[in-house]
Image (cartoon, rainbow, N blue to C red):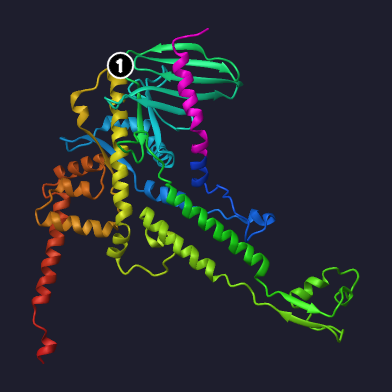
Amino acid sequence: MTTKYDSLVTDLVTELNGKQSKLEENEKYYEAENRLKALGLSVPPEMRHLTAAVGWPRMYLDSVEERLDVEGFRNSDQPEGDSRLMDWWQANYLDVESGLGHIESMMHGEAYVTVSAPTEDENPDNPLMKVESPKNFIAKDDYRTRKVKEALRLYKNEDVPNEEYAALLLPDENVYLARNMSGDWKVDSIVRHELGRVCCARLLNRERLTERNGKSEITLEIRSATDAASRILMNMQAAAELMALPQRVIFGVSMEDFVQDPLNPGASMEAYMARILAFENDAGKAMQFNAAELRNFVEALEEIAKLVASYTGLPPQYLSFSSENPASAEAIKSAESRLVKKAERKARMFGQAWEEAMRLGMLVIDGTIPDDAYKLETVWRDPSTPTFAAKADGVVKLAQAGILPVEQAREDLGYSDVQREQMRKWDSENPMGQLNTVLNAGFQADQAAAAQQARPNNNANR
Protein backbone atom coordinates (compact mmCIF):
# COMPACT_ATOMS: atom_id res chain seq x y z
CA MET A 1 0.00 0.00 0.00
CA THR A 2 1.37 3.40 -0.98
CA THR A 3 1.95 5.84 1.88
CA LYS A 4 3.05 9.45 2.09
CA TYR A 5 6.50 8.27 3.19
CA ASP A 6 7.26 6.07 0.15
CA SER A 7 8.68 8.77 -2.09
CA LEU A 8 10.88 10.26 0.62
CA VAL A 9 12.20 6.87 1.76
CA THR A 10 12.91 5.79 -1.82
CA ASP A 11 14.84 8.98 -2.58
CA LEU A 12 16.96 8.71 0.57
CA VAL A 13 17.68 5.01 0.05
CA THR A 14 18.65 5.64 -3.58
CA GLU A 15 21.02 8.42 -2.59
CA LEU A 16 22.52 6.32 0.22
CA ASN A 17 23.09 3.35 -2.10
CA GLY A 18 24.68 5.63 -4.67
CA LYS A 19 27.38 6.60 -2.15
CA GLN A 20 28.42 3.06 -1.28
CA SER A 21 31.15 2.60 -3.90
CA LYS A 22 32.81 5.87 -2.90
CA LEU A 23 32.55 5.03 0.80
CA GLU A 24 34.07 1.60 0.20
CA GLU A 25 36.98 3.18 -1.69
CA ASN A 26 37.61 5.58 1.22
CA GLU A 27 37.56 2.66 3.63
CA LYS A 28 40.00 0.63 1.52
CA TYR A 29 42.49 3.49 1.46
CA TYR A 30 42.18 3.88 5.23
CA GLU A 31 42.64 0.13 5.81
CA ALA A 32 45.44 -0.08 3.19
CA GLU A 33 43.39 -2.62 1.23
CA ASN A 34 43.17 -0.71 -2.04
CA ARG A 35 44.61 -2.75 -4.92
CA LEU A 36 46.04 -0.33 -7.45
CA LYS A 37 46.06 -0.92 -11.18
CA ALA A 38 49.59 -1.51 -12.45
CA LEU A 39 50.53 -1.03 -16.08
CA GLY A 40 52.55 -4.24 -16.11
CA LEU A 41 55.50 -2.74 -17.97
CA SER A 42 58.13 -3.71 -15.41
CA VAL A 43 56.35 -6.35 -13.34
CA PRO A 44 54.82 -9.44 -14.96
CA PRO A 45 51.14 -10.15 -14.21
CA GLU A 46 51.92 -13.28 -12.19
CA MET A 47 53.81 -11.13 -9.67
CA ARG A 48 51.02 -8.60 -9.08
CA HIS A 49 50.29 -10.18 -5.70
CA LEU A 50 53.48 -8.48 -4.49
CA THR A 51 51.61 -5.16 -4.36
CA ALA A 52 52.48 -3.63 -1.00
CA ALA A 53 50.02 -2.07 1.43
CA VAL A 54 50.93 1.53 2.32
CA GLY A 55 49.17 2.83 5.43
CA TRP A 56 49.81 6.56 5.13
CA PRO A 57 46.09 7.56 5.02
CA ARG A 58 45.38 5.73 8.28
CA MET A 59 48.52 7.13 9.89
CA TYR A 60 47.42 10.65 8.97
CA LEU A 61 43.81 10.30 10.15
CA ASP A 62 44.79 8.51 13.36
CA SER A 63 47.45 11.13 14.13
CA VAL A 64 44.82 13.88 13.99
CA GLU A 65 42.15 11.89 15.85
CA GLU A 66 44.55 11.00 18.66
CA ARG A 67 44.64 14.72 19.51
CA LEU A 68 40.84 15.14 19.65
CA ASP A 69 39.72 14.32 23.19
CA VAL A 70 36.60 15.93 24.64
CA GLU A 71 37.01 16.82 28.32
CA GLY A 72 33.69 18.48 29.01
CA PHE A 73 31.04 21.05 28.13
CA ARG A 74 30.36 24.46 29.64
CA ASN A 75 28.61 27.71 28.86
CA SER A 76 30.92 30.38 27.55
CA ASP A 77 30.04 32.71 30.47
CA GLN A 78 30.55 30.08 33.18
CA PRO A 79 33.92 28.87 34.54
CA GLU A 80 32.72 25.39 35.53
CA GLY A 81 31.75 22.55 33.26
CA ASP A 82 28.26 21.07 33.08
CA SER A 83 28.38 17.84 35.07
CA ARG A 84 25.01 16.65 33.76
CA LEU A 85 26.20 16.74 30.17
CA MET A 86 29.31 14.78 31.10
CA ASP A 87 27.07 12.21 32.80
CA TRP A 88 25.27 11.83 29.47
CA TRP A 89 28.63 11.58 27.71
CA GLN A 90 29.84 8.77 29.94
CA ALA A 91 26.48 6.95 30.04
CA ASN A 92 26.51 6.68 26.24
CA TYR A 93 30.18 5.56 26.08
CA LEU A 94 30.98 8.62 24.01
CA ASP A 95 34.47 8.85 25.46
CA VAL A 96 35.17 5.93 23.08
CA GLU A 97 32.41 6.32 20.47
CA SER A 98 33.31 9.96 19.80
CA GLY A 99 36.72 8.93 18.48
CA LEU A 100 35.09 6.45 16.13
CA GLY A 101 32.82 9.21 14.88
CA HIS A 102 35.76 11.55 14.29
CA ILE A 103 37.60 8.88 12.28
CA GLU A 104 34.47 8.07 10.27
CA SER A 105 33.90 11.74 9.50
CA MET A 106 37.47 12.33 8.38
CA MET A 107 37.41 9.15 6.32
CA HIS A 108 34.11 9.79 4.52
CA GLY A 109 33.50 13.50 5.06
CA GLU A 110 30.53 13.04 7.38
CA ALA A 111 29.18 11.06 10.32
CA TYR A 112 26.13 11.52 12.50
CA VAL A 113 24.99 11.60 16.13
CA THR A 114 21.39 10.62 16.88
CA VAL A 115 19.56 11.42 20.12
CA SER A 116 16.49 9.60 21.40
CA ALA A 117 14.52 9.12 24.59
CA PRO A 118 15.54 6.32 26.97
CA THR A 119 13.48 3.16 27.21
CA GLU A 120 11.54 2.18 30.30
CA ASP A 121 14.33 0.02 31.75
CA GLU A 122 16.98 2.75 31.35
CA ASN A 123 17.83 5.85 33.34
CA PRO A 124 15.10 8.40 32.51
CA ASP A 125 17.52 11.28 33.07
CA ASN A 126 19.93 10.18 30.32
CA PRO A 127 19.08 10.48 26.61
CA LEU A 128 20.36 7.80 24.23
CA MET A 129 23.11 9.11 21.97
CA LYS A 130 24.56 7.01 19.18
CA VAL A 131 27.23 7.70 16.57
CA GLU A 132 26.14 6.65 13.08
CA SER A 133 28.19 5.74 10.01
CA PRO A 134 27.38 7.28 6.59
CA LYS A 135 27.40 3.73 5.18
CA ASN A 136 23.94 3.10 6.63
CA PHE A 137 22.71 6.57 7.62
CA ILE A 138 21.89 9.70 5.64
CA ALA A 139 20.58 13.12 6.67
CA LYS A 140 19.51 16.24 4.77
CA ASP A 141 19.83 19.79 6.07
CA ASP A 142 17.49 22.70 5.71
CA TYR A 143 19.52 25.22 3.70
CA ARG A 144 18.24 28.25 5.64
CA THR A 145 18.36 27.01 9.23
CA ARG A 146 21.26 24.51 8.84
CA LYS A 147 19.21 22.06 10.94
CA VAL A 148 18.57 18.47 9.88
CA LYS A 149 15.14 18.26 8.26
CA GLU A 150 15.04 14.51 7.54
CA ALA A 151 17.21 11.48 8.17
CA LEU A 152 17.15 7.76 7.43
CA ARG A 153 18.88 4.79 9.04
CA LEU A 154 19.03 1.37 7.34
CA TYR A 155 19.64 -1.73 9.44
CA LYS A 156 19.04 -5.49 9.52
CA ASN A 157 17.94 -8.05 12.06
CA GLU A 158 20.18 -11.11 12.23
CA ASP A 159 17.19 -13.22 13.22
CA VAL A 160 15.35 -12.21 10.02
CA PRO A 161 18.07 -12.14 7.32
CA ASN A 162 15.63 -11.64 4.43
CA GLU A 163 14.14 -8.47 5.90
CA GLU A 164 15.54 -4.95 5.68
CA TYR A 165 14.51 -2.23 8.12
CA ALA A 166 14.56 1.54 8.05
CA ALA A 167 13.97 4.32 10.55
CA LEU A 168 12.81 7.60 9.03
CA LEU A 169 13.47 10.54 11.38
CA LEU A 170 11.22 13.57 10.87
CA PRO A 171 10.70 16.76 12.91
CA ASP A 172 7.63 15.51 14.80
CA GLU A 173 7.73 11.75 14.37
CA ASN A 174 9.90 8.69 13.78
CA VAL A 175 8.61 6.21 11.22
CA TYR A 176 9.79 2.60 11.31
CA LEU A 177 9.52 0.60 8.08
CA ALA A 178 10.37 -2.89 6.82
CA ARG A 179 10.49 -4.70 3.48
CA ASN A 180 11.57 -7.91 1.86
CA MET A 181 14.71 -7.69 -0.24
CA SER A 182 12.66 -7.34 -3.41
CA GLY A 183 9.49 -5.78 -1.97
CA ASP A 184 8.19 -2.33 -1.12
CA TRP A 185 8.58 -0.52 2.16
CA LYS A 186 5.76 -1.01 4.64
CA VAL A 187 5.19 1.03 7.79
CA ASP A 188 5.67 -1.01 10.96
CA SER A 189 5.04 1.72 13.50
CA ILE A 190 5.05 5.47 13.99
CA VAL A 191 6.28 7.20 17.15
CA ARG A 192 5.18 10.80 17.50
CA HIS A 193 7.41 12.94 19.73
CA GLU A 194 6.19 16.42 18.71
CA LEU A 195 9.61 17.98 19.41
CA GLY A 196 9.65 19.98 16.18
CA ARG A 197 13.22 18.84 15.46
CA VAL A 198 14.97 15.89 13.90
CA CYS A 199 17.13 14.62 16.75
CA CYS A 200 20.29 14.27 14.71
CA ALA A 201 23.55 16.24 14.52
CA ARG A 202 26.07 16.00 11.69
CA LEU A 203 29.82 15.57 12.17
CA LEU A 204 31.11 17.19 9.00
CA ASN A 205 34.71 17.23 7.77
CA ARG A 206 36.22 19.78 5.36
CA GLU A 207 32.89 21.52 4.95
CA ARG A 208 32.89 24.35 2.41
CA LEU A 209 30.38 26.97 1.36
CA THR A 210 29.85 25.00 -1.86
CA GLU A 211 30.23 21.56 -0.24
CA ARG A 212 27.92 21.42 2.76
CA ASN A 213 28.02 17.63 2.97
CA GLY A 214 31.72 17.48 3.85
CA LYS A 215 34.58 15.78 2.04
CA SER A 216 37.01 13.02 2.87
CA GLU A 217 40.32 13.94 4.46
CA ILE A 218 41.96 11.33 2.22
CA THR A 219 42.31 13.77 -0.66
CA LEU A 220 43.33 13.00 -4.23
CA GLU A 221 46.95 13.99 -3.70
CA ILE A 222 47.23 11.66 -0.67
CA ARG A 223 45.65 8.82 -2.67
CA SER A 224 47.97 9.34 -5.66
CA ALA A 225 51.04 9.46 -3.41
CA THR A 226 49.90 6.29 -1.65
CA ASP A 227 49.39 4.55 -4.99
CA ALA A 228 52.82 5.67 -6.22
CA ALA A 229 54.48 4.36 -3.05
CA SER A 230 52.64 1.05 -3.43
CA ARG A 231 53.88 0.67 -7.02
CA ILE A 232 57.45 1.43 -6.04
CA LEU A 233 57.34 -1.09 -3.22
CA MET A 234 55.91 -3.67 -5.62
CA ASN A 235 58.71 -2.99 -8.12
CA MET A 236 61.29 -3.20 -5.34
CA GLN A 237 59.94 -6.57 -4.23
CA ALA A 238 59.97 -7.83 -7.81
CA ALA A 239 63.56 -6.67 -8.25
CA ALA A 240 64.53 -8.33 -4.98
CA GLU A 241 62.75 -11.53 -6.03
CA LEU A 242 64.27 -11.72 -9.51
CA MET A 243 67.62 -9.98 -9.28
CA ALA A 244 68.66 -9.76 -5.62
CA LEU A 245 71.27 -12.52 -6.23
CA PRO A 246 73.81 -12.16 -9.04
CA GLN A 247 72.55 -14.11 -12.06
CA ARG A 248 74.95 -16.51 -13.74
CA VAL A 249 75.20 -17.72 -17.32
CA ILE A 250 77.14 -20.94 -17.98
CA PHE A 251 78.15 -22.00 -21.51
CA GLY A 252 79.38 -25.35 -22.81
CA VAL A 253 77.76 -27.60 -20.18
CA SER A 254 74.68 -29.78 -20.20
CA MET A 255 72.12 -30.48 -17.54
CA GLU A 256 73.81 -33.77 -16.70
CA ASP A 257 76.86 -31.86 -15.52
CA PHE A 258 74.73 -30.39 -12.72
CA VAL A 259 73.08 -33.59 -11.57
CA GLN A 260 75.52 -35.49 -9.40
CA ASP A 261 72.84 -37.50 -7.61
CA PRO A 262 69.69 -38.60 -9.51
CA LEU A 263 67.81 -38.49 -6.21
CA ASN A 264 68.83 -34.85 -5.66
CA PRO A 265 67.05 -32.71 -8.25
CA GLY A 266 68.02 -29.59 -6.28
CA ALA A 267 71.62 -29.68 -7.42
CA SER A 268 70.99 -27.02 -10.04
CA MET A 269 69.75 -24.70 -7.31
CA GLU A 270 72.90 -25.40 -5.31
CA ALA A 271 74.89 -24.30 -8.32
CA TYR A 272 72.82 -21.14 -8.59
CA MET A 273 73.41 -20.40 -4.90
CA ALA A 274 77.20 -20.73 -5.47
CA ARG A 275 77.59 -23.96 -3.52
CA ILE A 276 79.09 -25.53 -6.67
CA LEU A 277 81.91 -23.47 -8.14
CA ALA A 278 83.61 -25.99 -10.51
CA PHE A 279 82.68 -28.48 -13.22
CA GLU A 280 84.60 -31.34 -14.82
CA ASN A 281 83.59 -30.27 -18.33
CA ASP A 282 86.56 -28.50 -19.98
CA ALA A 283 84.28 -26.56 -22.32
CA GLY A 284 82.31 -24.99 -19.47
CA LYS A 285 82.55 -21.21 -19.21
CA ALA A 286 80.65 -18.98 -16.81
CA MET A 287 79.86 -15.28 -16.48
CA GLN A 288 77.90 -13.30 -13.88
CA PHE A 289 75.66 -10.24 -13.95
CA ASN A 290 75.61 -7.69 -11.19
CA ALA A 291 72.85 -7.89 -8.60
CA ALA A 292 70.05 -5.32 -8.72
CA GLU A 293 70.63 -2.00 -6.92
CA LEU A 294 67.60 -1.23 -4.72
CA ARG A 295 68.66 2.16 -3.45
CA ASN A 296 66.86 4.01 -6.24
CA PHE A 297 63.56 2.62 -4.93
CA VAL A 298 64.38 3.74 -1.37
CA GLU A 299 65.23 7.27 -2.51
CA ALA A 300 62.00 7.48 -4.53
CA LEU A 301 59.98 6.41 -1.47
CA GLU A 302 61.68 9.07 0.64
CA GLU A 303 60.74 11.78 -1.87
CA ILE A 304 57.11 10.64 -1.93
CA ALA A 305 57.06 10.58 1.87
CA LYS A 306 58.21 14.21 1.88
CA LEU A 307 55.31 15.08 -0.44
CA VAL A 308 52.87 13.36 1.92
CA ALA A 309 54.35 15.32 4.84
CA SER A 310 53.81 18.58 2.96
CA TYR A 311 50.20 17.62 2.12
CA THR A 312 49.24 16.48 5.61
CA GLY A 313 51.47 18.40 8.02
CA LEU A 314 52.79 15.17 9.56
CA PRO A 315 56.22 15.61 11.18
CA PRO A 316 59.16 13.97 9.34
CA GLN A 317 59.67 11.36 12.06
CA TYR A 318 56.08 10.14 11.60
CA LEU A 319 56.90 9.07 8.05
CA SER A 320 60.41 7.84 8.94
CA PHE A 321 62.24 9.67 6.18
CA SER A 322 64.28 11.67 8.69
CA SER A 323 66.69 9.75 10.90
CA GLU A 324 67.96 12.84 12.69
CA ASN A 325 66.94 13.28 16.32
CA PRO A 326 65.18 16.59 17.06
CA ALA A 327 67.53 19.07 18.68
CA SER A 328 65.17 19.99 21.51
CA ALA A 329 61.59 20.01 22.73
CA GLU A 330 61.09 23.27 20.83
CA ALA A 331 62.18 21.53 17.62
CA ILE A 332 59.58 18.80 18.20
CA LYS A 333 56.92 21.43 18.86
CA SER A 334 57.85 23.30 15.70
CA ALA A 335 57.66 20.12 13.60
CA GLU A 336 54.18 19.38 14.96
CA SER A 337 52.81 22.93 14.62
CA ARG A 338 50.78 22.27 11.44
CA LEU A 339 49.40 19.01 12.81
CA VAL A 340 48.39 20.74 16.06
CA LYS A 341 46.70 23.59 14.21
CA LYS A 342 44.84 21.09 12.01
CA ALA A 343 43.62 19.27 15.15
CA GLU A 344 42.41 22.57 16.59
CA ARG A 345 40.44 23.28 13.42
CA LYS A 346 38.89 19.82 13.53
CA ALA A 347 37.98 20.35 17.19
CA ARG A 348 36.14 23.54 16.26
CA MET A 349 34.17 21.80 13.51
CA PHE A 350 33.34 18.66 15.47
CA GLY A 351 32.64 20.62 18.63
CA GLN A 352 29.73 22.33 16.92
CA ALA A 353 28.10 18.94 16.28
CA TRP A 354 28.64 17.71 19.85
CA GLU A 355 27.14 20.93 21.23
CA GLU A 356 24.11 20.47 18.99
CA ALA A 357 23.79 16.85 20.20
CA MET A 358 23.79 18.04 23.83
CA ARG A 359 21.11 20.64 23.08
CA LEU A 360 19.01 17.92 21.46
CA GLY A 361 19.52 15.86 24.62
CA MET A 362 18.07 18.73 26.65
CA LEU A 363 15.13 18.87 24.26
CA VAL A 364 14.47 15.14 24.62
CA ILE A 365 14.79 15.06 28.44
CA ASP A 366 13.51 18.51 29.45
CA GLY A 367 11.15 19.19 26.56
CA THR A 368 12.86 22.49 25.72
CA ILE A 369 16.25 24.02 24.98
CA PRO A 370 17.11 26.86 27.38
CA ASP A 371 18.43 30.10 25.90
CA ASP A 372 21.81 29.84 27.61
CA ALA A 373 22.36 26.41 25.99
CA TYR A 374 23.25 28.24 22.78
CA LYS A 375 26.33 29.55 24.61
CA LEU A 376 27.49 25.96 25.08
CA GLU A 377 31.07 25.20 24.11
CA THR A 378 33.06 21.98 23.97
CA VAL A 379 36.18 21.76 26.13
CA TRP A 380 38.95 19.89 24.34
CA ARG A 381 42.22 18.56 25.67
CA ASP A 382 45.29 20.45 24.50
CA PRO A 383 46.16 18.89 21.10
CA SER A 384 49.86 19.72 21.44
CA THR A 385 52.27 17.39 23.21
CA PRO A 386 54.17 19.35 25.87
CA THR A 387 55.71 17.37 28.69
CA PHE A 388 53.93 17.74 32.00
CA ALA A 389 57.11 19.15 33.58
CA ALA A 390 57.43 21.86 30.92
CA LYS A 391 53.76 22.74 31.14
CA ALA A 392 53.82 22.83 34.94
CA ASP A 393 56.93 25.01 34.91
CA GLY A 394 55.25 27.58 32.66
CA VAL A 395 52.01 27.60 34.65
CA VAL A 396 53.81 27.95 37.98
CA LYS A 397 55.86 30.89 36.72
CA LEU A 398 52.72 32.67 35.49
CA ALA A 399 51.00 32.01 38.80
CA GLN A 400 54.02 33.31 40.74
CA ALA A 401 54.00 36.47 38.68
CA GLY A 402 50.34 37.01 39.51
CA ILE A 403 49.26 36.66 35.88
CA LEU A 404 47.21 33.50 36.48
CA PRO A 405 44.86 32.87 39.41
CA VAL A 406 45.08 29.52 41.16
CA GLU A 407 41.94 28.10 39.54
CA GLN A 408 43.12 28.97 36.02
CA ALA A 409 46.51 27.40 36.77
CA ARG A 410 44.86 24.18 37.82
CA GLU A 411 42.64 24.18 34.74
CA ASP A 412 45.62 24.79 32.45
CA LEU A 413 47.37 21.80 34.02
CA GLY A 414 44.48 19.62 32.88
CA TYR A 415 42.77 18.83 36.17
CA SER A 416 39.10 17.92 35.84
CA ASP A 417 36.18 19.73 37.48
CA VAL A 418 35.95 17.02 40.15
CA GLN A 419 39.66 17.22 40.92
CA ARG A 420 39.56 21.01 41.15
CA GLU A 421 36.55 20.84 43.47
CA GLN A 422 38.46 18.48 45.75
CA MET A 423 41.46 20.85 45.68
CA ARG A 424 39.23 23.76 46.71
CA LYS A 425 38.01 21.66 49.61
CA TRP A 426 41.59 21.00 50.69
CA ASP A 427 42.35 24.71 50.34
CA SER A 428 39.44 25.59 52.64
CA GLU A 429 40.74 23.17 55.25
CA ASN A 430 44.21 24.71 55.06
CA PRO A 431 44.25 28.53 55.22
CA MET A 432 47.63 28.64 53.52
CA GLY A 433 46.24 26.75 50.55
CA GLN A 434 47.87 23.73 49.01
CA LEU A 435 48.98 25.43 45.82
CA ASN A 436 50.17 28.56 47.66
CA THR A 437 52.45 26.37 49.73
CA VAL A 438 53.93 24.92 46.55
CA LEU A 439 54.32 28.35 45.00
CA ASN A 440 56.00 29.73 48.12
CA ALA A 441 58.38 26.78 48.16
CA GLY A 442 59.23 27.42 44.52
CA PHE A 443 59.68 31.14 45.21
CA GLN A 444 62.00 30.42 48.14
CA ALA A 445 64.03 28.04 46.00
CA ASP A 446 64.42 30.74 43.35
CA GLN A 447 65.48 33.25 46.01
CA ALA A 448 68.07 30.81 47.40
CA ALA A 449 69.46 30.17 43.92
CA ALA A 450 69.73 33.91 43.26
CA ALA A 451 71.50 34.45 46.59
CA GLN A 452 73.94 31.66 45.81
CA GLN A 453 74.83 33.26 42.49
CA ALA A 454 75.31 36.65 44.19
CA ARG A 455 77.94 35.30 46.64
CA PRO A 456 81.57 36.06 45.76
CA ASN A 457 83.67 33.17 44.53
CA ASN A 458 86.23 32.71 47.32
CA ASN A 459 88.30 30.30 45.28
CA ALA A 460 88.67 32.88 42.52
CA ASN A 461 89.87 35.55 45.05
CA ARG A 462 92.65 33.37 46.47
Q: Give the quarter of the image for residue 460.
A: bottom left
Residue 343: horizontal and vertical position, in percent? Answer: 32, 47
Q: Amino acid at mark 1?
A: Gly
Over which residues does the magenta segment extend?
1-24
Label 1 residue SS: loop
Please state if 199 lies on the left or on the right of 2 as rendered: left
Please state if 124 lies on the left or on the right of 304 as rendered: left
Residue 128: horizontal and vertical position, in percent? Answer: 38, 25
Q: Is residue 22 above or below residue 459?
A: above
Q: Main secondary structure of the magenta part?
A: helix
- Residue 4 forms part of the magenta stretch: yes
- Label 1: few (<14), some or many (≥20) within 10 Å? few
Residue occupying the point 40% across, 34% down: 111
Q: Is residue 433 visible?
A: yes
Q: Give the quarter of the image for residue 126.
A: top left
From the viewer's side, name the closer residue of 361 and 261.
261
Q: Is residue 16 above or below residue 277?
A: above
> Which residue position holds label 1?
196
- Residue 225 forms part of the magenta stretch: no
Furthest toward the right, the residue is 262
Residue occupying the point 66% across, 69% down: 243
Q: Give the quarter of the image for residue 326.
A: bottom left
The number of numbered badges drawn on the structure is 1
Q: Is residue 381 visible?
A: no
**Quarter in which the C terminus is drawn:** bottom left
Residue occupying the point 44% across, 23% down: 152
Residue 301: horizontal and vertical position, in percent? Answer: 49, 63
